[in-house]
Image (cartoon, rainbow, N blue to C red):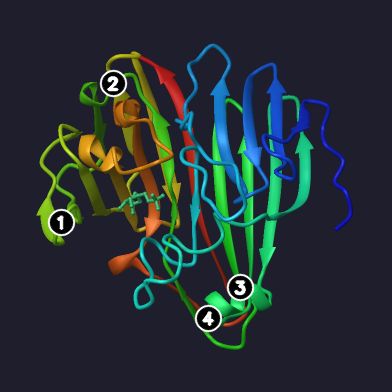
Amino acid sequence: MSEVNLPDVVTLEEPTPGYPVYVIRHPKFSGKIARHGAHVMEWTPSGQRTALYLSPTAIFKEGKAIRGGIPLCWPWFGPHATDTSLPSHGFVRTRFWNLIQATATESTVTFVFEIESDESTKKLWPFQFVLRATIIMGESLTVRLETFNTDKQAIEISEALHAYFSIGEIVHVNVTGLDQTTYMDVVDEPILCLQEGPVMIDQEVDRNYISTSDVELHDLTDNRCLLIKKRGSGTTVIWNPWIEKAATLADLPDKDYQRFLCIEPANEGNTLVIIPPGENHCIEMTVTVQAT
Ligand code: TA6
């Protein structure tokens, strides 16, 4: 792997030895991206509070997903359909990716990471693939995940851009863009429901909305709105663990459920993706912060 020259606005840090994190300090924004999981840890437009939540007790160790930022869930979302011994949310958020490119313009910085199938991935998922993550940081943030089927057979994937958005106070936010949308409530036994009006959070929420719509996260504490546009995604997952579930997560302070809401462009359940041999699929999210 040849070394990639980093733009001047990027420095390399290691929260733990051998765990590279790219730190971006640009006049218009700042950010952090870990090579582990091609994981966006932080994105902060200048003059704004940070847009993504990152747990202060996140663990930076190979094989453990970072709690917060934007974990990339692939090639399956949630628990594996048949083998509970396999890692939840697939196996790419828990391994180091290859940095292919890091470039900058006067208004953006772009990182491209890739993972290619090998013997270790085939033990978990017996298919050939190339997976590419493109992260474009600027006054907005774009995360693009492209699956290239390099196998001789069709492949079926589920996936999510599992974004943790930073908020002022969980009971003072709402999400619009999902009114009259069907969702599967998976907090307990799955049950099909219909969303009436904005999504409000006053309990554990774990919902898979069948929707291709863009959504808006309205933060009434911080007087701002996060516009979340997506493409290539048929499901929007909304999750907050609330009090009891938060207390079971060792890498999340008990009270921090109040400080984030996960809104995740995804494909899962009824919107699984089948990619013919030699073809590819792209899921993408673009986030913009607006003061209100
Ligand atoms: O966000 C949806 C979800 O599948 C929830 O059910 C919850 O498990 C969450 O992901 C976090 O999963 P993780 O494996 O990162 O703890």
Q: CA distance from mark 1 to mark 3?
A: 31 Å
Q: Looking at the picture, which amino acid does disc 1 mark?
A: Asp
Query: Where in the figure is residue 149, as x and y percent of width and height?
Result: 60, 75
Q: Are marks 2 and 3 in contact (CB under 8 Å)?
A: no
- In space, the residues marked 2 and 4 are separated at their CA atoms by 44 Å
What residue did someone put label 3 on?
121
Q: In the rendered structure, find residue 276 and report the number of the disc placed on it.
A: 4
Res 169 label: 2
Q: Earlier in the sequence, mark 1 or mark 3?
A: 3
For the residue carrying disc 3, how many other residues have a C-alpha within 10 Å: few (<14), some (14-19), or many (20+)?
some
**Nearest to N terminus: mark 1 or mark 2:** 2
Q: Which mark is nearer the camera, 2 or 4? A: 2
Q: Assess mark 4: CB under 8 A from ligand 1?
A: no
Looking at the rendered structure, the secondary structure element under dot 3 is helix
- Mark 2 or mark 4, earlier in chain: 2
Mark 2 residue element = loop
Q: Secondary structure at mark 4?
A: loop
Q: Residue at x 48, y 28 (%)?
A: 56
The C terminus: image quadrant: top left
- Amino acid marked by disc 4: Pro
Contact check, label 3 and label 4, Cβ < 8 Å? no
